[in-house]
Image (cartoon, rainbow, N blue to C red):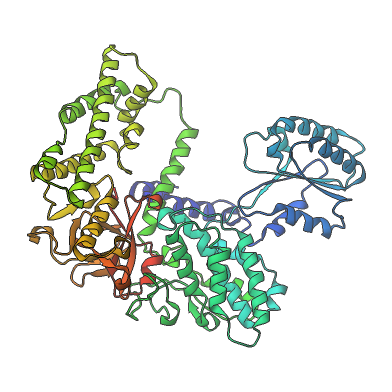
């Protein structure tokens, strides 16, 4: 335990791993606790729990996305000779079903039938009545020993504690870790079923289970994994397995229809959950890597690890191109190779003995990817622990009240921003007609003036409130709390731009933004040689100005043009004039990959360097029909590390490695990564 304290101090991102190791190796039966039911499917868990159930001890299912308790209980009822509709009644609760449920409970308890009450959280006002009824049934001497009650609900605070205390509680949450997920996925299929398949079907089924496990566990890496969280479940895997069996029976003895299978799995089964195009690209790339002919022989399951087979490494990194190089990524040593095995048990042994420990390399991510999510998980865990042990007389650290801290900050901010105003009217007077770039900068000035005016107004009101000249309102209280907590006030965020910065860093960034606009005004509306694109409220409008300028110059319809990017070798100090065919931009950061300034191409990240500063980029407009994706990676550009809805545009970056590698690595460009 003392070692864990050292780890907590030196490597907070590794604290949770150290705790798991401590529980697994030190506590009695610790491994059974950490791994729990990872080798059992939900039905096997239900069967084991049913042995502990009694007439007065119901089984209570806490539902999770993808769980199918009704199907499992129906299967168990049939196994015990119960007939649905007579000796086994399945009742979905809702309006008017309370009387039906109570009658079924009374009748079943006397004759030994089974009752399943679904979604009890939908009738919260009736649950105390149900609790009393369960007490009566338990106290009754006439209760039949074969009577069993099953309950289910979503996680809810309305469930009476008396019901929870008497129940055996089950939930079907995906296990943590790739090995545990793969065990559970493979356990969904019985040994007899799997052993009856031919070698091709068995190999593809295992590849499908591995893909399913990767899709589940990749969510662990938060925004580096997927832009959004999706409810993938064992039902998706089961449905894909049914499709696989049907296709293999139909194409028995002929070539495996890989394209058909990948389309059905990636666009319909799993793709049906996915709402983001970049997440869908990740899904397609995984399927193209895993489901191919090499899976029937021997396939490296860690994408783009050292020695990864060239033939199985395709993907759609940019457009539909796979790149122009056959050089696999180097510097990787983790490996998990899978060949065709004859039985279900052999694959279980492969999972237990050959699959390496948890590593981002299993998902095609760089080792650096786990630093962020592990640190975040560690913070959440200790925040929860502190909340459990918080005392009422907890001291406030420096002893300063929220009012004193907020008052000192607002004085500094008012002194800085009270007289700030961008007079864009000077530019309007100096030009006859604004070009697209001038129009964009003018709009940015107006938005900045609005933001600064709101900041000064709200801070001035708070100052008067502190002096007693105004009554403190809820809005003032929220502003004071935000200043004390060093977070950007919500009222300011609503009229500014997406940010994840604390207030102090946000103010420094705001000063840079104002300086860029002030320079534009003082230069009478001349577009800067290098534009700090990260400093705009609306960077998309700047890109639109690039398209409009090019469309006017080349006399091409605007909707036929797209943005293309080219990174330069030159540094900002070497740029002496504006771009001839677009605009030079700076201020972008690369996440998920490194940048080779010599070859001007993507490369591996260095250890513990999660971000790379990009060189000056020439942004220009090209006709869509001439936009070439060969040898480049189509990288999404986001405003913050939150990704998702902060998408701006797609940049094209040169690569000497498969673009699919950067797809799985979660590579992107960020305007403001702080």
Counting from the top left corner in percent of width and height, residue 106 is at 88, 38
Residue at left offset 65%, top offset 54%: 67
Q: Nearer the viewer, residue 671 or 139?
A: 671
Q: Nearer the viewer, residue 213 or 464?
A: 464
For the residue pair 198 and 622, the one nearer the viewer reads as: 622
Q: How many marks?
A: 0
Q: Position of residue 312 (x, y in %)?
A: 45, 79
| Quadrant position of residue 126 | top right
For residue 169, side relative to residue 8 (left or right): right
Compared with residue 504, is residue 76 higher up or lower down, i.e. above or below?
below
- Left or right: 431 with respect to 237? left
Q: Is residue 14 visible?
A: no
Which quarter of the picture shows residue 258?
bottom right
* Residue 202 in the image: above or below residue 424: below
Residue 360 sits above or below residue 15 on the image: below
Answer yes or no: is residue 394 visible. yes
Query: In the orientation shown, which residue stands out farthest toward the top?
Result: 469
Give x and y (percent) for residue 124: 69, 33
Splitting the image into 4 quarters, where does residue 662 fall? bottom left
Residue 428 on image: x %, y %: 14, 41
Q: Is residue 236 left or right of residue 421?
A: right
């Amino acid at each position: 335990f003392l070692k864990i304290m050292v780890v907590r101090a030196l490597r907070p991102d590794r604290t949770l791993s150290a705790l798991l190791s401590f529980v697994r190796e030190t506590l009695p039966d610790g491994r059974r606790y950490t791994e729990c039911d990872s080798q059992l499917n939900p039905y096997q868990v239900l069967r084991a729990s049913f042995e502990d159930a009694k007439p007065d001890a119901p089984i209570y299912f806490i539902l999770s996305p993808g769980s199918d308790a009704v199907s499992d209980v129906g299967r168990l009822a049939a196994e015990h000779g119960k007939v649905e509709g007579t000796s086994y009644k399945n009742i979905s609760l809702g309006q008017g079903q309370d009387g039906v449920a109570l009658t079924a409970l009374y009748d079943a308890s006397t004759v030994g039938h089974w009752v399943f009450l679904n979604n009890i959280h939908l009738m919260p006002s009736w649950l105390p009545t149900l609790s009393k009824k369960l007490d009566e049934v338990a106290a009754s001497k006439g209760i039949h020993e074969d009577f069993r009650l099953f309950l289910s609900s979503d996680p809810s605070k309305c469930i009476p504690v008396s019901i929870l205390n008497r129940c055996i509680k089950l939930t079907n949450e995906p296990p943590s870790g790739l090995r545990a997920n793969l065990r559970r996925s493979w356990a969904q299929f019985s040994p007899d079923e799997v052993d009856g398949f031919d070698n091709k079907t068995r190999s593809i089924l295992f590849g499908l289970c591995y893909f399913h496990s990767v899709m589940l566990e990749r969510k662990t890496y938060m925004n580096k994994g997927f832009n959004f969280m999706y409810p993938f479940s064992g039902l998706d895997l089961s449905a894909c397995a049914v499709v696989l069996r049907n296709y293999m029976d139909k194409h028995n003895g002929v070539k495996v229809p890989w394209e058909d299978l990948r389309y059905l799995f990636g666009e319909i089964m799993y793709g049906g959950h996915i709402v983001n195009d970049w997440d869908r690209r990740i899904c397609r790339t995984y399927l193209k890597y895993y489901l191919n002919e090499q899976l029937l022989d021997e396939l490296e399951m860690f994408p783009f690890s050292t020695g990864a087979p060239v033939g199985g490494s395709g993907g759609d990194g940019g457009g539909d191109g796979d790149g122009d190089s056959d050089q696999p990524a180097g510097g990787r040593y983790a490996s998990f190779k899978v060949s065709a095995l004859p039985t279900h048990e052999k694959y279980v042994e492969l999972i237990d003995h050959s699959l390496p420990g948890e590593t981002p390399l299993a998902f095609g991510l760089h080792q650096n990817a786990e630093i962020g999510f592990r640190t975040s998980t560690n913070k959440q865990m200790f925040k929860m622990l502190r909340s459990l042990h918080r005392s009422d007389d907890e001291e406030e650290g420096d002893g300063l009240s929220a009012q004193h801290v907020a008052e000192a900050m607002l004085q500094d901010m008012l002194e800085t921003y009270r007289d700030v105003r961008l007079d864009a009217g000077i530019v309007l007077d100096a030009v006859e007609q604004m070009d697209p770039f001038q129009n964009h900068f003018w709009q940015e000035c107006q938005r900045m003036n609005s933001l600064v005016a709101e900041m000064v107004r709200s801070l001035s009101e708070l100052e008067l409130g502190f002096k007693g000249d105004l009554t403190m309102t809820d809005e003032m209280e929220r502003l004071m709390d935000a200043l004390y907590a060093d977070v950007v006030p919500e009222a300011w965020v609503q009229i500014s731009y997406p940010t994840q910065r604390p207030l102090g860093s946000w103010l420094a960034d705001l000063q840079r933004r104002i300086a860029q606009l002030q320079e534009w005004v003082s230069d009478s509306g001349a577009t800067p040689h290098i534009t700090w694109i990260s400093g705009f409220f609306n960077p998309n409008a700047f890109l639109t100005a690039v398209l409009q300028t090019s469309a006017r110059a080349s006399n091409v319809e605007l909707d036929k043009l797209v943005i293309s990017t080219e990174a330069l070798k030159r540094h900002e100090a070497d740029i002496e004039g504006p771009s001839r065919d677009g605009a030079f931009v700076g201020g972008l950061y690369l996440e998920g990959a490194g940048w080779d300034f010599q070859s001007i191409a993507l490369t591996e990240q260095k250890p513990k360097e999660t971000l790379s500063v990009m060189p000056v980029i020439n942004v220009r407009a090209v006709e869509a029909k001439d936009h070439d994706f060969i040898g480049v990676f189509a990288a999404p550009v986001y405003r913050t590390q939150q990704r998702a809805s902060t998408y701006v545009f797609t940049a094209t970056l040169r690569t000497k490695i498969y673009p699919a590698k950067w797809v799985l690595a979660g590579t992107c460009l960020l305007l403001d990564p702080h």
